[in-house]
Image (cartoon, coloured by chain):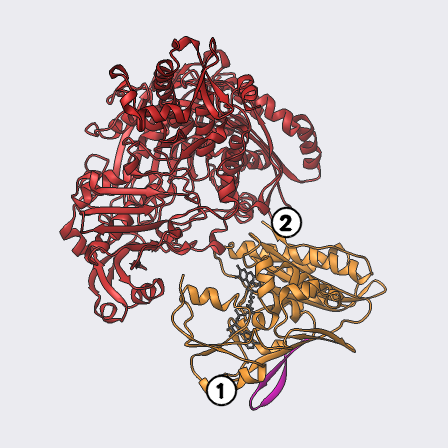
Amino acid sequence: MYTAAFEYHRASSLEEAATMLSQIGEGAKILAGGQSLIPLMKLRLAAPSHLIDIGFTSGGSYIREEGRLLRLGALTSHAEIELSPVAQRIAIVHDCAAGIADVQVRNRGTIGGSLAEADPSGDWATALLALSAEVHLISPAGERTLALDDFIKDAYTTALRSNEVIAEIRVHVPDAGSGGAYICLKRAAPVYATASVAVELKLEGNVCRQPAIVLGCVGLRPIRVDGAEAALRGREIDDVALEAAGEAVRVAADPESDMRGSAEYKRTVAGALVKRALRAALGRARGEIVETSHLYA
Amino acid sequence: MVKTETEEKNWVGRPVPRKEENRLLRGRGKFADDIKLRNMLYLGFVRSSYAHARIVAVDTSRAQARKGVVSVLTGPEIASETQPFLEIGPEPCAKIKDYPLAVSKIRYQGEPVAAVLAESPALAVDAVELVDVQYEPLDPVVDVEEALKDESVLHEEAATNRVWRGVFEYGNVDQAFAEAAYVVDIDRLHFHRFSSTPLETNVILAQWDGKDERIYYWCNNSFPSFAIQFLAAHLGVPIDRIRVETSDIGGSFGIKITSYPQMAVCALASRKAGGRAVKWVETRSEHMLASAHGNERTFRRTRVALDRQGVITALVSEHLDDCGAYPRYEPLGCVIWSQVFPGVYRFRNARIDFTQAVTNKCPVGPNRGYSRMQHLWFLERVVDICAHQLAIPADEMRLRNYIRREEFPYTTPNGCVYDSGNYAKMLDVAKALIGWEEWKKKQASAREEGRLIGIGIGTTLDSGTNNFGQSQIVNPAAPFSGNSQGANCKLDIYGEVVVAVGSCPQGQGHETTAAQVVADVLNIHPDTVTVRTGFDTERNVHTGFSGTYASQFAVSGLSAVHGAAQKLKHEMTRLAAFALQASSDDLEFGSGSTGPEIRSRSTGASINYWGLSNIVNVNSAVLPPELHDITLNCRYVWRAPFKVPDKEKKYGSLTLTYASQLHIAVVEIEPETFIPRILDYAAVDDCGTRINPPIVEGQVYGATAHGIGAALMERCVYDSLGNMLTSTFSDYTPITAMNMPNVKYGHIETPSPHSYSGAKGMGEGGAAPLHAISAALQDALSARGIVIADSFNNGDSLFRALAEQKSGQGTKPVKVERRS
Ligand SMILES: Cc1cc2nc3c(=O)[nH]c(=O)nc-3n(C[C@H](O)[C@H](O)[C@H](O)COP(=O)(O)OP(=O)(O)OC[C@H]3O[C@@H](n4cnc5c(N)ncnc54)[C@H](O)[C@@H]3O)c2cc1C
């Protein structure tokens, strides 16, 4: 497997990378962990003429909690997030990081790269959309911050301008009494999910507040399921509510049949996953320690 | 120390650590891609994105103009310089013209259309993209039953997609049906297409050397003596001009047997480049798309006659085998399944109408369990479905139908001789391992909770050392019969014991087991035996059957090694008798202070191996004339005791040994996601005498992994246009250690009377997990009236089966007629 020829540039900072993008223009691409881009180049499905490597910049990889904000440098690897005690406090973030592919991919792949790729089967966008997350972008023209929901436009399409790079991902730390979970069904570890579900909610007593339910892999972009949220909001989550949420998810999912499964099966799986994720989220909201894992077929 | 150890015990049968591990586990293996020659070029294949198309034009000019590109080869150019590859089958198969590059038509996605030669591998890939091919798409045929309608014909010269057809009929089928108490009809069963994904893909380094007009290959083909026969005829060169060398091989599972077309292209490319060496390293995507897959088979209109006790008395069925776009090793698979015609069962009356057809898919190759596993899966499905229909417990059904221990050696209805076995005992061992009774209880209580748990038995055979005379059943004019393997055992000039074998192992531990055999013959330690494995035509040990395939090394390879070692021992005895002035019965083999030696019991005088070799090799004036025939370099060819089968009756002994395996799987269909989960798993193996038990166990685990992968994860999927949807590991999802259950391993030993050591070939394994898992799923779902009719099952397919059944749309694939 050999890529087409390209010119390699090493940026010393994200700012410099953004400047290089502007200067080189057409044909230039940022290279972060390379776990999406390099496979595509080897299959010759992508053939950028210039690669701007941001893997050697310093200060692009960090996890910091500042007040109510968790700030993740764009170059933070999945593995760093998985192992970070700070990030671990947001269960959904940990679930997501720990379940991506295998150790090799987690060590190389970055959260910024994953969001920039906007693969409809990628894990990060789905998980983070259940939290209120923002993406901080820089370019020679300045900087801006977008809600993740506005950043992800479509399959493989983001709001990134041609001279912009992602510098940071900001996640609002959920209130006390909140809990979340992220669960996928995967056919094997190093393979994208068949369906995935992210759930975040808050309990007041036994009453569910602010539920957020997002589906991944079952549409061109992650799908927020208002119907399922409505079935839970302001009430106690019992089996009836779980079933209602499951049914709403089944209806909202918009999958295509492919090698991972038939459309009907993916709907059913999403409905099953949301119930599991909700149970885990509920336990966590009550302060219980709930271990979750993806389902491997 | 060594002496007493070897005197007390044979090395054969002991867990001798593998000699090759030292090299392989330290990353010091020598694989084909490790070999680099000066000035070598790299080859890249231009491949068709269509599955069925006419080639309108191939324009190589842009590629040729590219700096670093040396030349481009196309199909018409090759066709003008070579003969099409031999076809094993008679007409219509014989009319097929198979060239290593497509000449005027494309017949599967990924078929090579042209080959480019460049100074670097990256340049070769670049140049591949610069070859412009114009296609005129044709209707693709991806289903065997569609193919047999001949509406769109792949090979116009053959005028039909049918490759071969034959009826295998034995006993009195009509009478058995007339007398049956029950007749069960099974409309359709389907064995899916999958492959074995060796870690190392195909690699070929070739050089057509103009100086000596010889073709040199360093490659990982796993049946080189077969490949050179095809290559010599294709290239029009005497076979002695082709030298093939293999070294370590990272897995083959039969898939690398059919790399000869690529070998041809590499040689022709080297000739065109003035004799520069040419290397081709297959990418994973190329391997998945266009190396070889296993045979897909559909079983139609099966009828089973049973007596009142559920004993099967007769079976009729139509089997439709899909061999992909070119037959290559086929239609041998059309007879090879009949090595296990009745499986492990006693029925004597059967008629199987066997047809094979080409389709617009990757050509098949002899994938692990080749052609027999499809049939054995079919038989296990038949037995299991009948058991469920007649409400006979699955274990009881098998006991009523198994060939019995006292019936061995057992002659099957088609004349095969099962050497040894004890299937009922294997069932006992497996049931004990898995805790059969406990699982039955757990299953019952789980059912009350609405959970779907099934327990399935898979009994299978691994027939080894085949009689190539069976090729005459598919083609009466085929010039093959019997089986043989060669080995050489020598004392080198300084007395080293060196063994060479015509095998090319891919992890089977031949270096170790061959050393064990020689160590026993000469009463020395296996560490003192050097074994040269890997094929090399220049070693001159091979026969036309040499290679590593079809579960036979333990029998054919080691019998050859044993024969060569005995020949050497005989020469050494005569020589030592002369040197020590002793009679040969006074001599004993062993080790002394200077290493391996022969000594006289009465005088205590001894001569070591250096001394013996010295006389023959460098001090020969002392040798008396009556010992001049001694060379201490002994080649022995072992021949299997076969006759040519009766071609008309399709009757005869087709394989020498029959190892068996019995697996039990406990599987739960997970609520809501329908994912089949293996809760418990037992595998019992009987390969007769185990030459090296850990090696046997390793093979059992490997075959179990392959089988579980095939049953639940791995399949080659094509869409209706013939696009392959599983050409990467993300889509094909090969099994890894993470997906494996804990396997409870057990074994019994019924030594074979057909091999000198009592061993039976066992490497392929017979795909027992496919049988056991299908049976377990059947058991889980039979209460819902669902029949497991496909060898591949996953959450999606089980979800759909249950949904169809619920909505009442499911067809009734099985009918039972009760006559009593
Ligand atoms: C075998 C395998 C299995 C995988 N399985 C999963 C899985 O289960 N779940 C999952 O979510 N992912 C999976 N992935 C993908 C993995 O998570 C990638 O790491 C991730 O999608 C991309 O991150 P990266 O740093 O490797 O980005 P790269 O591959 O370097 O880049 C990806 C894209 O993002 C752009 N980019 C990167 N960083 C920035 C930035 N800071 N600003 C602007 N643009 C940027 C690049 O230009 C490129 O277009 C898998 C990958 C492999 C190889």
Q: Position of A266 compared to B561: left or right? A: right
Is residue B727 positioned above or below B259 on the image? below
Residue A150 drawn at (x, y percent): 60, 79
Q: Residue furthest bottom?
A: A141
Q: Quadrant of ligand 1?
A: bottom right
Q: Is residue A246 above or below residue B669?
A: below
Foreground disc of the pair 1, 2: 1
- Mark 1 Cα within 10 Å, few/some/many (few <14, many 20+)? some
Q: Which residue is mark 1?
A: A22
Q: Chain of mark 1?
A: A
Single out the residue that lies furthest toward the left: B80
**Image height of B597 relative to B766, above or below:** above
Magenta stretch holds residue A142: yes
In the rendered picture, chain B carries what hue? red
Look at mark 2 in the image and give the residue it sits on: B672
Please identify which colour was used for chain A in the image: orange
Question: Which image quarter is the N terminus of chain B in?
Answer: top right
Residue B132, image x and y in percent? 25, 67
Q: Amino acid at mark 2?
A: Glu
Provide residue B301's location: percent of width, then percent of height: 38, 32
Residue plotted at (27% across, 23% down): B621
Q: CA distance from mark 1 to mark 2?
A: 51 Å
Amino acid at dot 1: Ser
* Label 1 SS: helix
Q: In which image quadrant can residue B633 be found?
A: top left
Q: Tag on residue B446?
A: none
Which residues lie in the magenta part?
A133-147
> Tag 2's secondary structure?
loop
